[in-house]
C-alpha cells in the first residue's frame, strides 16, 4: 500500500495494466487481440506526440504575434501570469492522470466515424388502463433506439453460404415471405427468380442499439445494447477459437397490442444482412433473420416473478422470420427453465442451451436499464 522506501509506487504497474492492456483490449474486436492492443498503444502515442506538436506550434505562433506587435507587458500582467503558472503546476499531476483517458476518448470518436447511425428516441404508448406501481401512471414509453452498424460489412457472401455458416436453413424461404408481404405487386415466381441461393448479400456480425436517456428517468443516462450474429470460427488446426454467438432480442409486433413487454416478441438473431444495390428497389435497408419465440406469458410465473416464453414451432419446424433491423427494440436475456429441461447429452462449455431447451424465463434483472424499464411498465417481476 505504502510503496517502497525509494518512493516507487507498487500500484504503478496495475494502473499501466489498465491503460495498456484493458483499454486496448476493449477497443479491439477481440480477434488477434495482442497485435491490435500494441497498435492501440502506438496510436495513442502518435496522437499525444501530434497534440504536443500542434500545441508547441500554436504557442510559438502566438509568441511571434506578440513580439511582432512590440507590446509591453505591465507589472500587473506579470503577476497574473505568475499566478496562472503556479495554478498550472498544481494541476500537472491531475493532467497527467487524465491524458490517457482523453486520448482514448478521442480515438474512440475517431473510430466511430466509420459507423452509420439511424433513428433514436422514445415512443409513448397509447393510453390504457392505470397500472399500480407504474412510475408514470398511464404514460408509458417504449424504446426506439439508434441502430448502428459499421459502414464496411463484415463479409460479402451468397445467401446459400450464409445459411450454412450461420445455421439458418430457412433464411431464403423467410426472405421470400418477407418480400411477398412488403411487395405484394411481385409474384412468387418473380421473387424466386430474383432472390436465389447465389444472390450475394453484405453481412454484419454485430450491430449496436443506442438508447437515449429514458424520459421516465433521465438521470439513468444512455444505454448501449450489442447484437451479435457471429458464426463459429475455426482456426487452421480445426479448433474452435471463437464459439458461435447469436444474441436474443425483443422485436416489435407488427400489430402491437397489450402493454409493456406484451408489445414485443422474443427472437434470436441469426444473421444481419443487406441486399445488393441492384436489388434495393425490392427491399432497402438492413434486415435481420431471426428465430422466433412465443409471445411472453400474460402474467409472471410464481415463485420467480418472471415472464416465460417458449420456442415457437409450426408443424414441427422452428418458426423464423426476416424483419427490418430497425424493428429490434432492445436485447434481452432468456434463461432456460432447467426444471423442464432434460438434455439427452451432458452439457459442456460449447452447448447451445437456446437450441437445446424449449422453455425460458425472460430475465428482467439482466441490467439495471432493463429492470427500470419493466418497472416503468409496471411489470417488475411480481408474481400474480
Image (cartoon, helix red, strand yellow):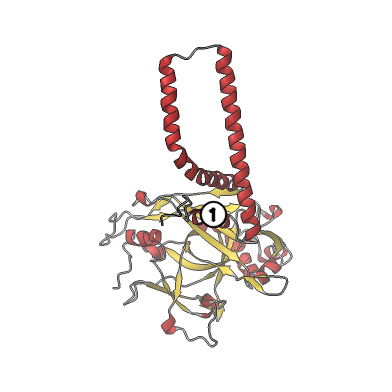
In the image, is residue 196 above or below residue 52? below
Q: Position of residue 176 (x, y in %)?
A: 63, 65
Residue 89 occupies quadrant: top left
Question: Which residue sits at x=32%, y=53%?
Answer: 139
Question: Can residue 119 be seen here?
Answer: yes
Residue 27, located in which quarter of the rendered image? bottom right
Q: Residue at x 64, y 55 (%)?
A: 36
Quadrant hosting residue 189? bottom right
Residue 68 drawn at (x, y percent): 58, 14
| Image coords of residue 30 (percent x, y) | 60, 61
Q: How many marks?
A: 1
**Viewer-closest of 112 and 130:** 112
Residue lying furthest front in this view?
5
125 and 106: which is toward the camera: 106
Q: Nearer the viewer, residue 49 or 301?
A: 49
Q: Is residue 137 left or right of residue 277?
A: left
Could you classify mark 1 by the number of other residues whose Cα lies within 10 Å: few (under 14), some (14-19), or many (20 or more)?
A: some
In the rendered image, residue 121, in percent from the top left (x then y), is placed at: 44, 49
Q: For the C terminus, which image quadrant?
A: bottom left
Above-or-below relation of 91 to 319: above
**Residue lying furthest left in this view?**
132
User: Which quadrant holds the N terminus?
Assistant: bottom left
Q: Nearer the viewer, residue 140 or 49?
A: 49
82 is higher (above) or lower (below) than 106: above
**From this viewpoint, is residue 283 visible?**
no
SS for callout 1: helix
Q: Which residue is mark 1?
A: 23
Amino acid at each position: 500500500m505504502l510503496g517502497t522506501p525509494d518512493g516507487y509506487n507498487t500500484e504503478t504497474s496495475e494502473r499501466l495494466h489498465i491503460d495498456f492492456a484493458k483499454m486496448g483490449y476493449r477497443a479491439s474486436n477481440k480477434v488477434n487481440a495482442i497485435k491490435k492492443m500494441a497498435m492501440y498503444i502506438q496510436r495513442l502515442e502518435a496522437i499525444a506526440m501530434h497534440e504536443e506538436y500542434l500545441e508547441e506550434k500554436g504557442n510559438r505562433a502566438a509568441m511571434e504575434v506578440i513580439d511582432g506587435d512590440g507590446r509591453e507587458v505591465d507589472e500587473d500582467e506579470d503577476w497574473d501570469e505568475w499566478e496562472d503558472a503556479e495554478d498550472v503546476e498544481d494541476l500537472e499531476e491531475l493532467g497527467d492522470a487524465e491524458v490517457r483517458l482523453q486520448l482514448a476518448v478521442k480515438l474512440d470518436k475517431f473510430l466511430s466515424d466509420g459507423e452509420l447511425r439511424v433513428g433514436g428516441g422514445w415512443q409513448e404508448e397509447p393510453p390504457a388502463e392505470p397500472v399500480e406501481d407504474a412510475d408514470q401512471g398511464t404514460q408509458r414509453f417504449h424504446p426506439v433506439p439508434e441502430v448502428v452498424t459499421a459502414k464496411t460489412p463484415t463479409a460479402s457472401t451468397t445467401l446459400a453460404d450464409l445459411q450454412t455458416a450461420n445455421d439458418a436453413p430457412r433464411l431464403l424461404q423467410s426472405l421470400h415471405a418477407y418480400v411477398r408481404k412488403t411487395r405484394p405487386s411481385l409474384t412468387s415466381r418473380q421473387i424466386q427468380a430474383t432472390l436465389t441461393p447465389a444472390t450475394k448479400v453484405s453481412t454484419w456480425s454485430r450491430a449496436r442499439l443506442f438508447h437515449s436517456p429514458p424520459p421516465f428517468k433521465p438521470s439513468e443516462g444512455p444505454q448501449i445494447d450489442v447484437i451479435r450474429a457471429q458464426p463459429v470460427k475455426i482456426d487452421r488446426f480445426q479448433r474452435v477459437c471463437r464459439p458461435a454467438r447469436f444474441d436474443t432480442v425483443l422485436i416489435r409486433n407488427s400489430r402491437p397490442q397489450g402493454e409493456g413487454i406484451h408489445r414485443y416478441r422474443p427472437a434470436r438473431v441469426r444473421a444481419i444482412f443487406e441486399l445488393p444495390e441492384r436489388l434495393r428497389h425490392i427491399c432497402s435497408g438492413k434486415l435481420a433473420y431471426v428465430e422466433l419465440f412465443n409471445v411472453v406469458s400474460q402474467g409472471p410465473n410464481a415463485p420467480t416473478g418472471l415472464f416465460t416464453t417458449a420456442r415457437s414451432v409450426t408443424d414441427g419446424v422452428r418458426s423464423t422470420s426476416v424483419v427490418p433491423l430497425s424493428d429490434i427494440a432492445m436485447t434481452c436475456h432468456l434463461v432456460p427453465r432447467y426444471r423442464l429441461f432434460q438434455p439427452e447429452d451432458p452439457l459442456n462449455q460449447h452447448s447451445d442451451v437456446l437450441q437445446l431447451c424449449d422453455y425460458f424465463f425472460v430475465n428482467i434483472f439482466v441490467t439495471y436499464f432493463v429492470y427500470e424499464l419493466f418497472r416503468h411498465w409496471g411489470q417488475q417481476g411480481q408474481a400474480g
